[in-house]
Amino acid sequence: YKNWAKKYEDDVINLAGYVGHLITSELLLSYLRNTQAKILDAGCGTGLVGEMLNKNNFKNLIGVDFSQEMLNIAKQKNVYQSLELVDLTKNLDYEDSLFDAIVCAGTFTCGHVGPEALIEMVRITKKGGYICFTVRKQEWKASPYKEIIDNLENSNLWRQVVHKTAEYNVKEGITCQLCLYQVI
């Protein structure tokens, strides 16, 4: 991502037809009404989701990513209260029940962050808060997303609100699982 950061948006949107940022933002916005909500953009990249949320008057945004170069581009958009270099595969340095919502678009994909990160996301989300995310089709099949999601649901830690197949990289014919869960 260090060398790709400057061309990232052009490559993923114009060449691949990436829509992950659009579908997650739209889904979250259809349920989250409080524009003062504290939202974590997990794997924020260049800030595509942050831009969408900001345009809809959500200003209390924190972005985290593993690439400083991507964060540098996100910073130029002036849509985040703070941006932090974070490894989502590790325990997160946030207190329990801190966020009203977490959005994670384009991060659960091949070779990036695995489904175990969902456990930490539940921990740092307030009861009644939402976690909205995409999982690329190939990754959904290759990793135990279903098992972890079901475990969280069976443990009464969250409940499914929306879980469906959606377009992801339109020009490449790639789909994803689009998910919205509410922490309980």
Image (cartoon, grey):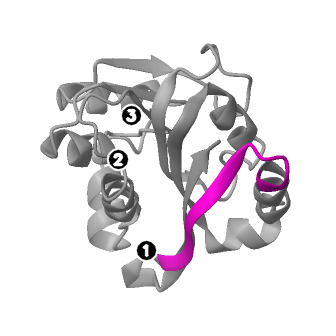
**Residue 165 within the segment the image draws in magenta:** yes
Query: Where is residue 75 drawn, in percent x and y?
Result: 26, 25
Task: Locate residue 83: give its quadrant.
Answer: top left
Q: Amino acid at mark 3?
A: Met
Q: Earlier in the sequence, mark 1 or mark 3?
A: 3
Residue marked by disc 1: 169
CA distance for labels 3 and 2:
26 Å
The label number, if any, that marks residue 32 in the structure image: 2
Going from N to C along the chain, the mark reached first, 3 or 2, is 2
Q: Residues within 10 Å of mark 2 (few under 14, many from 20)?
A: some
Which residue reaches farthest bottom? Answer: 173
User: Is residue 101 rendered magenta in the image?
Assistant: no
Looking at the rendered structure, the kind of residue marked 2 is Leu
> Which stretch is magenta?
153-166
For this view, does 154 lie left or right of residue 25? right
Q: Which residue is mark 3?
A: 70
Q: Quadrant of residue 134?
A: bottom right
Task: Nearest to the eye among marks 3 and 2: give it.
Answer: 2
| 56 sits left or right of 23 in the view | left
- Label 1 crowd (10 A; few <14 / some 14-19 / many >=20): some
Q: Whole-percent x and y of residue 153?
A: 77, 54
